[in-house]
Amino acid sequence: MNLARIVAVAAVGLALGAAASARAEGDAKAAVQKKEMCEGCHGITGYRTAYPQVYTAPKLGGQSPGYILQALQGYKSGARKHPSMTAIAGSLSDKDMADLAAYYGAEK
């Protein structure tokens, strides 16, 4: 790979990173009307689900907004696998995801 191509690939990566960062800036107040679908599992301390296997649903409050956004996008794209989360993320717009990420990221 020549130097010009390496620089071009790096520039594209930086641009994509900046775009993802911009999308991560959601409206936490708007998420109050959208969070009900999350609270059923993630809002119950120690909650364990039995579908598709038994596991503990992680607490979302205080997580990095960028991580939450990336996880939701991964479920929506199919890069991350979980039937329930894939269905929920598939119903969310980019704005919904950014808003939820801002809401849970601000929570302690």
Image (cartoon, helix red, strand yellow):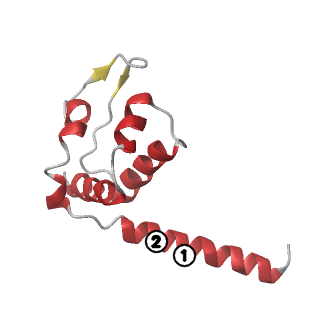
At label 1, the amino acid type is: Ala
Front residue (pair 62, 101): 101
Q: Residue at x 32, y 30 (%)?
A: 57
* Numbered circle sitting on residue 19: 2
- Secondary structure of residue under mark 2: helix
* Numbered circle sitting on residue 35: none
Q: Which residue is mark 1?
A: 15
Q: Residue at x 43, y 29 (%)?
A: 83
In which quadrant of the rendered image does the N terminus lie?
Answer: bottom right
The answer to which quarter of the image holds residue 12 is bottom right
Q: Position of residue 25 (x, y in %)?
A: 31, 67
Assess disc 2: are there few (<14), some (14-19) or many (≥20) residues with their C-alpha within 10 Å of its C-alpha: few
At label 2, the amino acid type is: Ala
Front residue (pair 73, 43): 73
Q: Residue at x 23, y 37 (%)?
A: 37
- Secondary structure of residue under mark 1: helix
Q: Position of residue 26 (x, y in %)?
A: 27, 64
Q: Tags 2 and 1 in contact by the CB under 8 Å rule?
A: yes
